[in-house]
């Protein structure tokens, strides 16, 4: 190397003990790679069920997915959507090109997996439930979400959509969105972190400073930046997020970035990348030491191997698991590709002294990982991704890349709780994890989930076991107990819970179909709510989500009380009404035979009985031109045309039950009227409005050109409406709703007419 090259390589190392130029040159030539994986599936956009902070998804198992088995040979490490999309397209073209000369079918096997939401990950690892967005929080409640802390995420190259993707992710999953805060390149320290989430994007240099020069875009590193910021935020939603963008992925740039953040102020530093350890690794341990600083790094994603910077004894090395969780206790196995092993270069740190690997082998040098988190691509986690010139898409990402920032989030939450209890930030947490937690059986069981199954290789020490192992370290976090151990505070405060809101309501079901109706209870965020019914009919139940269930409803009208009770003992109740209709078809009462005289106006009516509730609607098909039928059943023909006609009448209720009737209409040729010609009576249409619960009445009066005595009847009227023989129409205790029905007027010779009644009860 030339002298100038040596000087450039050494430029990042001014704040720590002097490093010889040869070593600095080696570091400058060592490239790190991100440790993420992407599941080989193109996911649909997740639902917005968690939007607003409802934590709805935490009640259910993660969404499952499956992919064609022909994708099994596609490496998931640093897999891009472009490569995956191209491969899927090629598989489709291959099969198309093979037909029809031979039969080619998709691979009979499939790849299956799940994808987790933030609410599900938080529930699985025991973090407090997310509050409703915008909820007023106490200081302790905000601390349980990381308020006032800083998480530095070091990545290579520039991601122009890091913040917009972070906020799309946050909005989708009920997390608080983050406000952009620009940091001047001349700043020597950051202002105190606020109690709300802010986001800053810095560009580091080899000389431990910031620059306004924006690094280039890199398609391999962009997903790393996104998953880092999104999942650190998912664990510590109120912490300040600082994305530090290095100009390149060289180890010298990493050292420059770590020195920069150390100057900017205390916080947790997450590094989701690594390179295979080299002889120079131990020379730079001092770069990961600082007051109030905790350094976290991915242990790797290619099986048994030891990576730098995770191998540094001052860095918390994070391995990976595959997690199974469906709403209750989680189970985990070591992820087959998690990094881990014993260093060939770094001496045994004091905190690991006395620890054994599976098989009883004493640790002789630094061993990694220290801890673990969900990381298998078959149990991935949602990430929002907007690539240049493309729309936002969603993928299932994994790897120890996604595990490291989540451990950084846990440490940030612990620091926030310590701060409000007047305690200093944790800094290096190794001694506390190994000596104060893992060495104490009770503390270990409450703080960590010991992963005892799975392996990342074939060697004797490449498998998980009881206690420490070189696949999952000490295990995964039981957040409630771990935070208590790290902070000395026995409980962490969830969002305050008030009483649930139970609105009551009126429901209608069918005896011919199973009933499933939500009680529409609004429960406080961050608490479990249970439900009970009293006075309900036999067979009607309520499940754990507040949904009414009745497998075989029985026709009738019912009233019952539903009660919701939170885990904090707050409750509320309300009355619900349920009407189960028989589910039978309406029946025509009109005979379907009509007569008229050619050239004369005609009016008549279709009528039917309604065994269910609601309003009947009438229609006809095949009617002669000029014959009109209203939805209330009124038939009219301004000038009937002589002939015999057949058509079909149909009556339908609000639930889709219907009946049809074959109708016949005979129109006689017009003759000179005689004294004996009978004229059908008529009745004018009318509209009324009345208050619910009131008594409504009106007198209907038809007209008959022949002066015949008239009688009246109802067709399609709601239950409760009555009509006297004299034409008095009334309803005692009118029920809210909009109704349309007919009053049928009939003369002494059997001729009929109809008057349409429109009634609004409000």
Image (cartoon, rainbow, N blue to C red):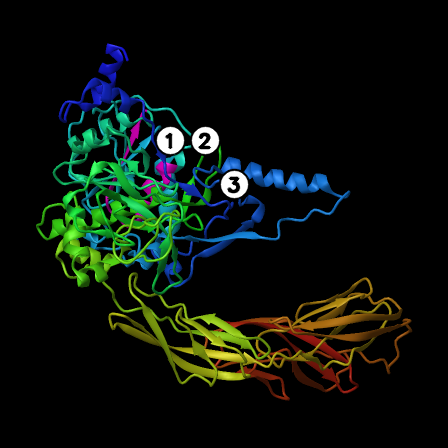
Residue 274 spot, x, y in % from top left: 32, 35
- Camera-nearest label, 3 or 1: 3
Q: State the quadrant of the N terminus.
A: top left
Q: Secondary structure at mark 1?
A: loop
Looking at the rendered structure, which numbered label has been put on residue 160? 1
Which span is picked out in magenta? 224-247
Taking the view exactly as shown, the residue that stands out farthest to the left is 422
- Can you say whether 28 is above or below 600 in the image? above
- The answer to whether 679 is drawn above or below residue 79 in the figure is below
Q: CA distance from mark 3 to mark 1?
A: 28 Å
Residue that carries the numbered disc 2 in the rendered image: 388
Do residues under tags 2 and 3 come within 8 Å of each other at their CB atoms? no
Membership of 227 in magenta stretch: yes
Classify 20 as above or below 699. above
**How many residues crowd mark 1 within 10 Å: few (<14), some (14–19), many (20+)?**
some
Comparing 275 with 60, the one in front is: 275
Tell me the CA gap for discs 2 and 1: 9 Å
Residue at image mark 3: 74
The x and y percentages for residue 750 are 78, 84
Whether residue 232 is visible, yes or no, is no
* Residue 595: image location, x then y, percent: 83, 76
């Amino acid at each position: 190397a030339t002298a100038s090259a040596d000087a450039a390589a050494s430029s990042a190392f001014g704040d720590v003990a002097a490093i010889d130029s040869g070593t600095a040159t080696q570091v400058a030539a060592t490239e790190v790679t991100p440790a993420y994986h992407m599941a080989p599936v193109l996911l649909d956009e997740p639902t917005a069920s968690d939007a607003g902070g409802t934590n709805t998804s935490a009640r259910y198992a993660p969404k499952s997915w499956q992919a064609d088995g022909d994708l099994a040979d596609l490496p998931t490490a640093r897999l891009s959507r472009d490569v995956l999309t191209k491969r899927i397209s090629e598989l489709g073209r291959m099969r198309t090109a093979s037909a029809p000369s031979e039969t080619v079918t998709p691979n009979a096997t499939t790849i299956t997996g799940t994808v987790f939401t933030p609410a599900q990950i938080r529930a699985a690892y025991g973090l407090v439930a997310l509050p409703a967005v915008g909820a007023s929080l106490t200081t302790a409640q905000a601390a349980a979400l990381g308020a006032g802390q800083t998480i530095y995420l070091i990545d290579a190259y520039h991601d122009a959509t890091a913040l917009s993707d972070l906020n799309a992710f946050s909005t989708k999953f009920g997390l608080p969105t983050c406000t952009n805060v620009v940091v001047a390149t001349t700043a020597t320290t950051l202002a105190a972190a606020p109690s709300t989430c802010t986001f800053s994007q810095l560009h580091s240099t080899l000389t431990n400073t910031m620059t306004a020069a924006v690094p280039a875009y890199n398609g391999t590193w962009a997903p790393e930046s996104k998953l880092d910021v999104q999942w650190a935020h998912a664990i510590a939603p109120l912490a300040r997020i600082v994305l530090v963008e290095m100009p390149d992925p060289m180890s010298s740039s990493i050292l420059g970035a770590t020195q920069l953040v150390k100057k900017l102020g205390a916080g947790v530093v997450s590094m989701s990348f690594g390179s295979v350890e080299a002889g120079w690794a131990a020379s730079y341990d001092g770069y990961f030491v600082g007051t109030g600083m905790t350094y976290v790094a991915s242990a790797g994603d290619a099986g048994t191997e030891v990576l730098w910077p995770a191998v540094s004894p001052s860095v918390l090395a994070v391995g990976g698991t595959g997690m199974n969780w469906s709403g209750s206790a989680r189970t985990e196995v070591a992820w087959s590709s998690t990094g881990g092993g014993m260093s060939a270069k770094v001496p045994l740190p004091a905190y690991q002294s006395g620890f054994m690997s599976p098989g009883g082998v004493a640790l002789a040098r630094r061993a990694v990982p220290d801890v673990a988190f969900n990381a298998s691509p078959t149990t991935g986690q949602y990430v929002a991704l907007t690539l240049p010139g493309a729309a936002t898409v969603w993928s299932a990402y994994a790897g120890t890349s996604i595990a490291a920032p989540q451990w950084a989030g846990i440490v940030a939450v612990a620091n926030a709780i310590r701060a409000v209890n007047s305690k200093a930030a944790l800094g290096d947490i190794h001694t506390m994890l190994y000596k104060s937690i893992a060495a104490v059986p009770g503390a270990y069981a409450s703080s960590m989930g010991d992963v005892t199954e799975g392996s990342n290789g074939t060697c004797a020490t490449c498998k998980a076991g009881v206690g420490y192992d070189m696949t999952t370290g000490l295990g995964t976090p039981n957040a409630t107990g771990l935070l208590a151990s790290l902070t000395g505070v026995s409980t962490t405060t969830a969002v305050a819970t008030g009483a649930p809101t139970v609105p009551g309501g009126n429901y209608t079901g069918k005896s011919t179909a199973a009933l499933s109706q939500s009680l529409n209870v609004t429960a406080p965020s961050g608490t479990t709510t249970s439900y009970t019914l009293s006075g309900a009919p036999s067979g009607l139940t309520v499940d754990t989500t507040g949904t009414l269930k009745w497998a075989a409803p029985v026709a009738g009208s019912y009233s019952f009380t539903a009660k919701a009770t939170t885990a904090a003992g707050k409750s509320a109740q309300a009355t619900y009404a349920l009407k189960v209709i028989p589910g039978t078809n309406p029946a025509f009462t009109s005979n379907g035979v009509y007569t008229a005289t050619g050239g004369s106006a005609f009016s008549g009516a279709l009528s039917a009985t309604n065994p269910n509730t609601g309003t009947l609607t009438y229609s006809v098909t095949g009617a002669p031109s000029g014959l009109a039928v209203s939805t209330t059943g009124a038939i009219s023909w301004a000038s009937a045309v002589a002939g015999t006609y057949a058509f079909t009448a149909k009556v339908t209720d609000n639930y889709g039950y219907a009946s049809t009737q074959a109708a016949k209409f005979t129109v006689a040729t017009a003759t000179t009227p005689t004294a004996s010609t009978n004229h059908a009576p008529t009745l004018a249409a009318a509209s009324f409005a009345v208050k619910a619960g009131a008594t409504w009445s009106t007198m209907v009066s038809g007209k008959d050109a022949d002066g015949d005595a008239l009688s009246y009847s109802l067709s399609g009227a709601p239950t409760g409406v009555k009509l006297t023989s004299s034409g008095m129409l009334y309803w005692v205790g009118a029920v809210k709703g909009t109704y349309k029905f007919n009053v049928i007027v009939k003369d002494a010779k059997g001729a009929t007419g109809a008057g349409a009644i429109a009634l609004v009860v409000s």
